[in-house]
Amino acid sequence: MTVKDVTDVIERFAPLTIQEGWDNSGLCIGSPDAPVSSVLLGLDCTPELVDEAVECGADMIVTHHPLIFSGLKKICPEDKVGEAVIKAVKAGISVYAAHTSADKVIAGVSGAMAARLGLRNVEILEEDGEGTGLGVVGDLPEPLTAEEAVRLVKERFALKAMRASRPVEGRISRVAMCGGSGGSLIKAAMKSGAQLYLSGDISYHNFFTRDGFMIMDIGHYESEIEIVDILFSLIKKNFPTFAVRITQNIYSNPIFYF
């Protein structure tokens, strides 16, 4: 089996052609023709994840976030990205990322968020005209008060804490969401008729919401982590006898809650 065999499966699910123009999804280290005997999956390609790949004998890493996101002017071990690049190249490990390519399919990051809340009638929030796009919106099985929605979201996403705008009055029946950094989709969420919007990395001024609309910032990592399980299942389904594993030891969220 080769790297291309694995990436072909991922790209049938999340084509690179739909990624955002600023993104760097795809193969960032290695050759498509390189042989692969085992794959390790995680959300972020940290130096620790590369170490784990070496220890477990994986010769390919698949993550959601790209290891090389913007142009590198130097590669040195004092920098976390540089350290991971050096370790991966030295060990002959190929590194692939499905980032906004996996964000923009309805069965990807945001669709997984909707499934956690049991939303119905789920559709893409901001379509790109090709049946794909960023975010999703759907209906709760039954309307909830703001307090009930807070409890549900914290339970389903296993949150220690969240940031939220002023609770809405009345009941919430329609919810929009976008995994990762979703501040740019707030207007689309309001336009969709949602009373609640879930995402991460929401800036201060966006919490001054209009009446009848509420925002919950559940965290970048917390909103996206399920994509790792989705990619694992995808590869395992297509290669049932192939050695595929999810990182066992790495919690890569750089944000700590005290």
Image (cartoon, grey):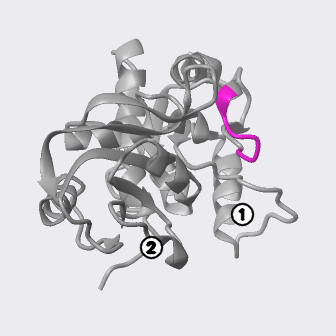
Label 1 residue SS = helix
Is residue 26 within the magenta segment?
A: no
> What whole-number distance in Å separates the C-alpha atoms at marks 1 and 2?
36 Å
| Front tag of 1 and 2 | 2
Residue density around tag 2, few if under 14, some if 14–19, many if 20 or more, within 10 Å: some
Amino acid found under the numbered disc labelled 1: Gly
The image shows residue 184, relative to residue 38, as above or below, that is below
Q: What stretch is highlighted in magenta?
A: 18-23
Residue 29, picture quadrant: top right
The image shows residue 32, relative to residue 205, as above or below, that is above
Q: Can residue 105 be seen in this view?
A: yes
Residue placed under numbered mark 2 in the picture: 207
Q: Where is residue 248 in the image (x, y as percent from the top left)?
A: 32, 51
Horizontal side of residue 92 vs 49, given as left or right: right
Amino acid found under the numbered disc labelled 2: Phe
Of residues 93 and 124, which is closer to you in this image?
A: 124
Q: Position of residue 212 (x, y in %)?
A: 32, 61
Label 2 residue SS = helix
Q: What residue is shown at x 72% (from left), y 63% (from top)?
A: 82
- The disc placed on residue 72 is none
- The disc placed on residue 82 is 1
Q: Earlier in the sequence, mark 1 or mark 2?
A: 1
Is residue 19 within the magenta segment?
A: yes
Of residues 58 and 101, which is closer to you in this image?
A: 101
